[in-house]
Amino acid sequence: MKKNSIIIIVAVILVAAGAVYYFTRPVDTNKQYYYSAGDAFVTNVIDSDRLIKTTVVLGLSQDVGDELDEKNAKVRDCVLYVLRNQTVEQYQQGDLQDQLSDAIVGRLNESFPAHEGEAPLFVKAYFSDFVMQ
C-alpha cells in the first residue's frame, strides 16, 4: 500500500511539473505565421487618377488564420484604408514598402487589439507584387 502511495505522489508531482513548464515556458518570438488577405488590392491613389495594385500577406505572432477568415472583410478594409490614403509622392519614396507595412500593421493592431499580456497579433505586411498605373 505504501508503495502505491509513493507512485501516486511521484506521478502527481510529474504532472504538476509538466503543467508548470507548459504554461510558463518562453514563447518563441521569432516564430511567425502567415495569413493571405485574399485577392489583390486595387485602389485609387489619393488626389490622383492613378491606381495602385498590390497583394498583401500578413505576418502574425499567433496561428489564428482560421479566425481571421471570418473577419477577412475587416482585415481587407484596414489594408485598403492605408493604401488609399497615400499620395503619389508617398508611393514614390524609396522606403515605401517599410512605411506601408508599418502603417498597415498599426491599423490592424488598432482594429484587432491584443489581450493584456499578449504580443500584438500583426507583425509585418509583405507585398508580393506592387504596381502603380
Image: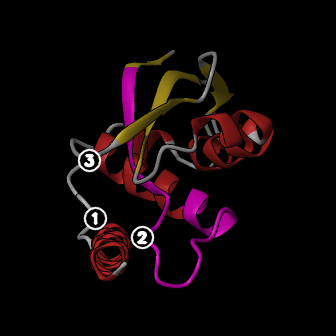
The one of 118 and 102 positioned closer to us in this rendering: 118
Residue 31 badge: 3
Q: Which residue is painted at 32% across and 44% down in the image?
A: 32
Tell me where residue 23 appears, x and y as whole percent.
38, 73
The one of 128 and 12 positioned closer to us in this rendering: 12
Q: Which residue is painted at 46% across and 30% down in the image?
A: 57
**For mark 1, does the 10 Å Cα neighbourhood hold few (<14), some (14 to 19), or many (20 or more) residues?**
few
Q: Is residue 57 visible?
A: yes
Label 3 vs label 1, nearer the camera: 1
Q: Earlier in the sequence, mark 3 or mark 2?
A: 3
Q: Which residue is painted at 51% across and 51% down in the image?
A: 104
The residue tagged 2 is: 119
Tell me where residue 4 appears, x and y as whole percent.
35, 72
Q: Earlier in the sequence, mark 1 or mark 2?
A: 1
Q: Quadrant of the N terminus?
A: bottom left
Amino acid on which the number 2 mark rests in the picture: Ala
Circle 1 SS class: loop
The answer to whether 87 is drawn above or below residue 121 in the figure is above
Describe residue 101's horizontal placement relative to residue 82 as left or right.
left
Amino acid on which the number 3 mark rests in the picture: Lys
Circle 3 SS class: loop
**For mark 3, does the 10 Å Cα neighbourhood hold few (<14), some (14 to 19), or many (20 or more) residues?**
few
The residue tagged 1 is: 27
Q: Is residue 49 visible?
A: no
On the image, which quarter does residue 8 sit in? bottom left
Circle 2 SS class: loop
- Segment tinted magenta in the rendering: 107-128
The one of 44 and 124 positioned closer to us in this rendering: 124
Label 1 vs label 2, nearer the camera: 1
117 is within the stretch colored magenta: yes
Q: Could you tell me if the residues under marks 3 and 1 are in contact, i.e. CB atoms within 8 Å?
A: no
